[in-house]
């Protein structure tokens, strides 16, 4: 039996008709790498509900690795998130028209969790492959951070060896065409980037030690 890598992407939100995270993730459904096989699942862009769908998928599939992926419109590269924080502070309404402001995701949960993916090694490998990438110090405070925190909390509570993290990806060119001046990336590059992130995660149980931070 192959071990499972769970990839999640989101449904479209904020008046978009497509979400690159789901497009990229679903094209990797069934992809094999060594003893591992990818399962792709879509998450609703809805506070609370998204975490229920993620939690059920993790319970059902018992994955070794989970990489949640989301759209970060305007970001220029594949951004490998370092940290999930325990706060919802939505700048816009979610897909059920709820806008949560300044609420903890898990009452009395820790302030934050770090990704357990080898984030520096992933950025390094992506750049080597000619794909723009960076470490991101914040996944925001909308549904992506909500899912990232919920996932890391679940992993922590269970005390499993499951490794998990979050990757934000830019707009697709067709979306950026409607947002002049915003960066974009081709779907094939995003998909190749996710393959590289998976291979790098499998190859590195310990992260590289190289600078990836900011002065501000
Ligand atoms: N991006 C949003 C939520 C869903 C998505 O793809 C975010 O960054 O929070």
Image (cartoon, rainbow, N blue to C red):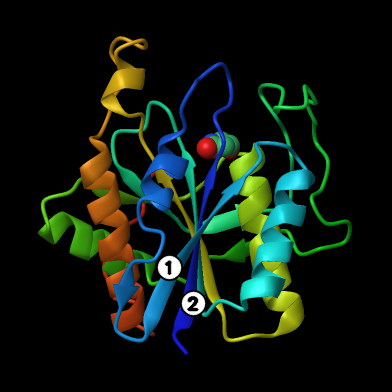
Distance between the alpha carbons at the discs numbered 1 and 2: 6 Å
- Please tell me which of labels 1 and 2 falls first in the chain: 2
User: 46 and 180: which one is in front?
Assistant: 46
On-image quarter of the C terminus: top left
Local crowd size for mark 1, using a 10 Å CA cut-off: few (<14), some (14–19), many (≥20): many
In the image, residue 206 sits, relative to residue 44, either above or below, namely below
Q: Which mark is residue 95?
A: none
Residue that numbered label 1 is attached to: 38
Label 2: how many Cα within 10 Å (few below 14, some 14–19, many 20+): some
Residue 13 percent coordinates (x, y)? 58, 26
Q: Secondary structure at mark 2?
A: strand
Any part of residue 162 in sight = yes
Q: Secondary structure at mark 1?
A: strand
Q: Could you tell me which residue is drawn at 79 percent across and 46 percent down?
A: 48
Q: Residue furthest right?
A: 107
Mark 2 — residue? Answer: 4
Give the residue at x 56% y 16%: 15
Q: Is the residue under label 2 in contact with that under label 1 (CB below 8 Å)? A: yes
Residue 102 point in image, percent of width and height: 80, 36
């Amino acid at each position: 039996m192959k071990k499972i890598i769970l990839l999640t992407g989101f449904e479209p939100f904020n008046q978009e008709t497509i979400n690159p995270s789901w497009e990229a993730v679903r094209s990797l459904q069934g992809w094999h790498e060594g003893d591992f096989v990818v399962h792709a699942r879509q998450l609703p862009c809805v506070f609370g509900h998204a975490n229920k769908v993620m939690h059920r998928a993790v319970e059902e599939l018992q994955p070794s690795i989970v990489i949640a992926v989301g759209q970060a419109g305007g970001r220029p590269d594949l951004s490998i998130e370092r940290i999930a924080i325990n706060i919802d502070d939505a700048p816009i309404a979610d897909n059920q028209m709820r806008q949560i402001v300044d609420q903890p995701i898990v009452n009395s949960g820790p302030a934050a969790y770090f990704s357990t993916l080898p984030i520096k090694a992933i950025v390094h490998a992506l750049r080597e492959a000619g794909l723009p990438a960076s470490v991101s110090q914040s996944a925001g405070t909308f549904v992506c951070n909500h899912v990232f925190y919920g996932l890391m909390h679940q992993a922590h509570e269970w005390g499993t060896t499951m490794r998990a993290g979050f990757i934000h990806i830019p707009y697709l060119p067709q979306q950026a065409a409607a947002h002049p001046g915003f960066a974009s990336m081709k779907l094939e590059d995003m998909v190749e980037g996710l393959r590289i992130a998976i291979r790098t995660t499998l190859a590195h149980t310990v992260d590289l030690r190289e600078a990836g931070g900011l002065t501000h």
